[in-house]
């Protein structure tokens, strides 16, 4: 099984095929992730790392959704997809003109078919993208890197999780990076097939 470090840039990882669209980075494989299909076989990948990559891809919604479909296609059942992105309310996200799309936990949950069905049953307006696209994954963990001065105050007990959550809703630069670990679920129900 393959392990892919997609959009590696100069961050090469041992044990991974390091992939980037820029030959100048000297990746193991030069691939434009916005060109489909990707050059890997169905169900051939056990692990994917997207570290500070997904926010640069898919300015056009159709392209972004095609990227999610390709991720799903190449991944084997139970494959792990780790997505690391800057929080959309951080200077790291806002300052880079090549960032085209904020990546959030809520947005990633839209590809979880169990949550899609639950939302539909409860009459919510969220789009069941997992069902529409025939993809399915579950978020196994999320880790948010709290920035200073919030981190010191949280670590010393002056602030609780609820305080941080409220701060994130009201202020910028509370959270730096977000790390989401997704687990691929196959086979997935497809709206076209069912």
Image: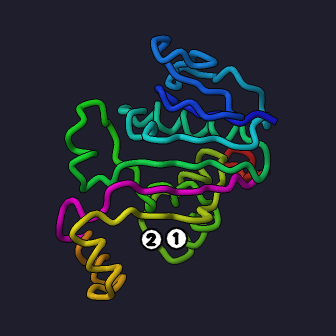
- Residue placed furthest toward the right: 1
Q: For the point 26% across and 69% down, which residue is it?
A: 168
- Left or right relative to 68: residue 3: right
Residue that label 2 marks: 124
Q: For the point 82% across and 36% down, which residue is it?
A: 1
Q: Secondary structure beneath disc 1?
A: helix
Query: Which of these two is toward me, 1 or 169?
Result: 1
Q: For the point 61% across and 55% down, which residue is it?
A: 182
Q: CA distance from mark 2 to mark 1?
A: 5 Å
Residue that label 1 marks: 119
Give neighbour class at mark 2: few <14, some 14-19, many 20+ (Cα, 10 Å). Answer: few
Query: Which of these two is toward me, 147 or 119?
Result: 147
Image quadrant assignment for residue 98: top left
Instruction: Name the disc covering residue 140, or none.
Output: none
Above or below, 1 against 28 in this view is below
- Residue placed furthest toward the left: 171
Give neighbour class at mark 1: few <14, some 14-19, many 20+ (Cα, 10 Å). Answer: some
- Percent across and percent down for residue 100 are 32, 36
Above or below, 85 against 145 in this view is above
Whether the residues at callouts 2 and 1 have beta carbons within 8 Å, the answer is yes
- Percent across and percent down for residue 44 are 79, 34
Residues in magenta? 169-185
């Amino acid at each position: 099984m393959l392990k892919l470090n997609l959009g590696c840039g100069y961050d090469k990882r041992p044990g991974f095929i390091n992939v980037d669209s820029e030959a100048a980075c000297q990746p193991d494989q030069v691939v434009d992730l916005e060109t489909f299909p990707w050059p890997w076989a169905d169900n051939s990948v056990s692990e994917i790392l997207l570290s500070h990559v997904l926010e640069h891809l898919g300015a056009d919604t159709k392209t972004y959704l095609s990227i999610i479909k390709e991720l799903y296609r190449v991944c084997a059942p139970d494959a792990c997809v780790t997505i690391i992105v800057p929080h959309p309310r951080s200077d790291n996200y806002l300052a880079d003109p090549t960032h085209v799309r904020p990546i959030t936990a809520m947005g990633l949950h839209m590809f979880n078919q169990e949550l899609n069905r639950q939302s539909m049953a409860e009459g919510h307006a969220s789009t069941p993208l997992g069902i529409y696209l025939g993809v399915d994954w579950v978020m196994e963990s999320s880790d948010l890197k709290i920035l200073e001065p919030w981190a010191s105050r949280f670590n010393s007990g002056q602030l609780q999780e609820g305080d941080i959550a409220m701060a994130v809703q009201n202020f910028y630069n509370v959270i730096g990076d977000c790390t989401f670990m997704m687990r691929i679920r196959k086979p997935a129900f497809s709206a076209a097939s069912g």
